[in-house]
Image (cartoon, coloured by chain):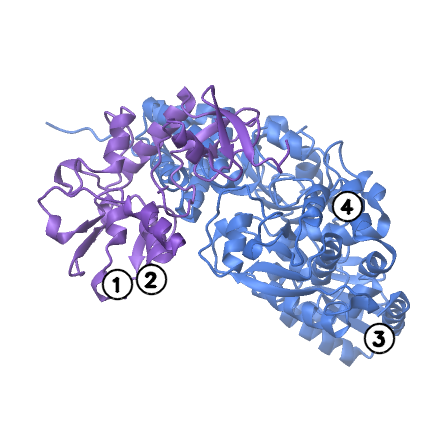
Chain colours: A blue, B purple
Amino acid sequence: MNIEELEQIAESVRLENSRYDFEVNVCMDLACMSQGSDRLRDELVKAAEASGKKVLVRRTGCMGPCSSGPLVRVDPEETLYHHVKAGDAEAIVSSLGGDPVPALQCDLNEHFDKQVRVVLENAGHIDPEKIDDYIARDGYKALLTALTEMTPNGVVHRITESGLRGRGGGGYPTGLKWGTVAKAGGDLKYVVCNGDEGDPGAFMDRSVMEGDPHRIIEGMAIAAYGVGASKGFIYVRAEYPIAVSRLTTALREARRRGLLGNGICGTTFNFDVEIRLGAGAFVCGEETALLASIEGRRGTPRPRPPYPAVSGLWGKPTLINNVETYANVAPIVRNGGKWFFNMGSERSKGTKVFALTGRITHTGLIEVPLGIKLWEIIDVIGGGVPGGHTLKAVQTGGPSGGCIPAEMLGLGVSYDALMAAGSIMGSGGMIVMDDTSCMVNVARFFIEFCMTESCGKCIPCRAGTAQMYTLLTRICEGQGTMDDLDLLVELCDTVKNASLCGLGQTAPNPVLSTLKYFRNEYIEHIVHKRCPAGVCNIQAPVEVLA
Amino acid sequence: MNDAVEVKTLIIDEQEVSARRGQTILEVARENGIQIPTLCSLDGLSSVGACRMCLVEIKGSNKLLPACVATVYEGMEVTTNSERLQKYRRNILELLFAERNHICSVCVSNGHCELQTLGQQHGLTHVRLPYRNPDLHVDASHERFTVDHNRCVLCTRCVRVCAEIEGAHIWDVKGRGIDSIVITDLNQPWGESACTRCGKCVQVCPTGALFDKSKVGADHPKYPDFLPFLNMMREAQ
């Protein structure tokens, strides 16, 4: 395989596609599939055959606005249809070449206009199970360029130059991490992709794995070349069966095309990837726990240092990055570090995929340049809070993050600004809450999550989150006292500073941020025994008759 | 900082000390008579940094490090006993006392318990947190030993000594978070497990969770000091 052969494949795909007059793209992401988009595709294929028109019906990854699913986009007109049922297939096919079907058409221009697609550039445009589709959109070009025209140092330098920061949540400079692994000694090194996405309300990585699996493989291969690794692992949670099956297909196809394996593209570079399934533990998203899990041991974190870059899988230097981080690699290598560096805000470069959920009109997947104002995401892209309710807070960063109050919507979304506001960027979950949400209850929900997902190794996290949950439950039930609140704050401090891994160290964030911005709600529950949002079921004190 | 230099000098609690490269803060502190409280750590076993009692402050870093695993470097400045650390240690002990059913007066290890001693050393006079009072069982199926999960602090010394020293690995941890529990084999009764009856786990258990049946009602001190000696003799062979 060389650049010319790659170009030939791309050309043959273009030739094949040009035989059709219309392309009907059906979103077959988990959300649309669960609403019957697989049956819809079958019906579309049948209707297309019956009509005699030259129609290509294509399965694609996530198009974005999941709440409008199942979604169908007709190209070249780019007509978007929402809530399409299998029964609508004939109407869509017969409308091809004429006016679109008005009942199904949706106008989401505002939703898409503010978005910039880098990671999701192919999602919704290619069949995730066809490597040739990916190649036709410049796929694997970056890998071949890196292997044939760049030195490993040059690759690391390009990533450093781009200013890319880890998309798993920590925001550690990716180039710095790659450089550390590259400098680590030893013949055997590993590259690991963290696809153990577990935050409640987050599905960015799943959509990338389901919609564009080759992009991750390409990113990992480039990373492996850069740091000198020969073996890769993708750690995916078993709850993502579609992602696993598409990744498996993608790996097989990449091997068949000679893009994985020994002597890739006639060079001396060897690299292959294996998939490992997680068994449903949130803590296995923590890098040292994830590595323990890959090794076949109990998924518990260990103290760092030594960092995985020095001593990771089986004691070997290991590069571990998130799905979205790897998904950014190929475009950076292709377009140059400067191109990426010019997007985003001062210290947070590029774009970020967010999973917009909760009380918002358009829930789904969005990709925005960093530095974008929070209100632009909520009001413009998300379409605001539905049902005449008012926005109360935006929760970012999952159970490790915090709640940002409605007053702070002018905030530019970046690693540092979110951190300063008491939350974190996290992996990209963004939950919108309106006036029907009780912030104490929200804090309790996240603490309960951390309590059940704590591995149990260190005492502050294991017992501390359990005690915090008990105290928050008391407050929610109207049984809490101001002493309980003081105790809660003290526990937050201990759990945050004394816990072993990131799970425990960030577990108090939902409590601390709601206490910072919504302290009055806690006071209402404790002093006045009422829940302002009407969520908590506080029983009026029963008068005991003598 | 030059890593080639084998001897490091550092400051622990305003005392200048020297150390060999690769030594942990805990080792160096102990050599110099500076006491750092520990619970999960035990001389002769691998360190896991789980109990967080030995957390220390390092100048220039806002992260607390477990002294049992953090290694020294040249010019390091360590504080082992600040007010903040003492508060965290008291809170950790309080969390432990409220987690399970630790009732010293009816415990075989009363007077010889590391948890009890730590509580006394840290002036823990009462527990502010609500007691969780979990419903845990006692496994007395073994002919010589008993495990009382009510007294377990999940330090995993038994797991480590069985796997690392005895080589049997019959102990492990089941479940997660607050529901974690030590188990024998694949959660079979201890008496039916592949236990070699060596009793090392009982000797290293810091509390009365693991005890010798013949000692019930009598004084039951434990002697974990055999471990470093055993290791030394093995290495000498």
Q: Nearer the viewer, mark 4 or mark 1?
A: 1
In three-dimensional space, the C-alpha distance between marks 4 and 1, rounded to whole angstroms, equals 54 Å
Callout 3 and callout 1 share a chain: no
Q: Nearer the viewer, residue A153 or A186?
A: A186
User: Which residue matches tag 2?
Assistant: B168
Q: Residues within 10 Å of mark 2 (few under 14, many from 20)?
A: some
**Are dots 1 and 2 in contact, CB under 8 Å?**
yes
Q: Nearer the viewer, mark 3 or mark 1?
A: 1
Q: Amino acid at mark 3?
A: Lys
Q: Position of residue B215 (x, y in %)?
A: 12, 48
- Return the chain for callout 2: B
User: Which residue matches tag 1?
Assistant: B196
In three-dimensional space, the C-alpha distance between marks 3 and 1, rounded to whole angstroms, equals 74 Å
Q: Nearer the viewer, residue A375 or B122?
A: B122
User: Which residue matches tag 3?
Assistant: A54
Q: Amino acid at mark 2?
A: Ala
Q: Secondary structure at mark 4?
A: helix
User: Which residue matches tag 4?
Assistant: A159
Identify whether A275 is placed above or below B45: below
Identify whether A242 is placed above or below A155: below
Of the 4 image quadrants, the one containing the C terminus of chain A is: top left
